[in-house]
Image: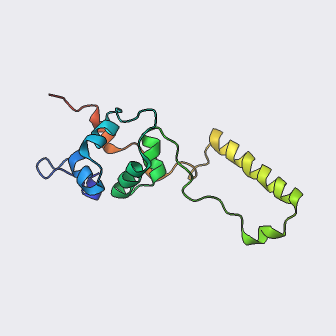
Amino acid sequence: MEDVGAISPRTKQASMNALAEISGVHATTIQRIVYGRAIGPRGVAKDTIEKLAEALNKKPSTIAKWVGQQWAADDPYVAPPEASILGPRQRKAVDEMIMALVELQKRVPVKGEGKEEDDDEPELATSAGSHKRR
């Protein structure tokens, strides 16, 4: 969070209040997310995830993963224009190959694919467990 300026001017440490100011998400909401209390039956709101992602320079799918939610693909697959000359059987074969690759990716992610650099756990959430309440 330090790299996006979400630090306390007093302590110079990562700050939920500073993140709230940067993201436009209420500090209480951020605290509930960090401590796992904001995830109800509907989960964290989509716009909240998007605001936090923008503030932290992360993909929304990464933030959603941190809070245990699914997110639609960031960039949906689009077949190249040349695929339009394929017939129905060929298109079906291509679809089957894609599904086989997806299943393989789920079981054994290819190094450098699937898991992104910013998929690491958030700094704030890992230090939150040591937060002492008064």
Q: Nearer the viewer, residue 24 or 61?
A: 24
Give the percent coordinates (x, y) of residue 93.
83, 54
Determine the image quadrant of residue 58: bottom left
Give the percent coordinates (x, y) of residue 9.
13, 53
In the image, residue 39 sits, relative to residue 26, either above or below, namely: above
Task: Give me the residue at 89% from left, 56% from top.
Answer: 89
Question: Is residue 78 found left or right of 57 in the rendered image?
Answer: right
Give the percent coordinates (x, y) of residue 8.
17, 50
Task: Give me the residue at 30% from left, 42% from top.
Answer: 29
Label total for image: 0
Determine the image quadrant of residue 67: top left
Task: Give me the residue at 26% from left, 53% from top.
Answer: 2
Task: Give me the residue at 18% from left, 29% from top.
Answer: 133
Q: Nearer the viewer, residue 111 or 76?
A: 76
In the image, residue 41 sits, relative to residue 6, either above or below, namely: above
The residue furthest top is: 134
Q: Nearer the viewer, residue 127 or 46?
A: 46
Is residue 15 at all visible to an observer of this figure?
A: no
The residue furthest front is: 42
Quadrant housing the C terminus: top left
Is residue 38 at all visible to an observer of this figure?
A: yes
Give the percent coordinates (x, y) of residue 116.
50, 51
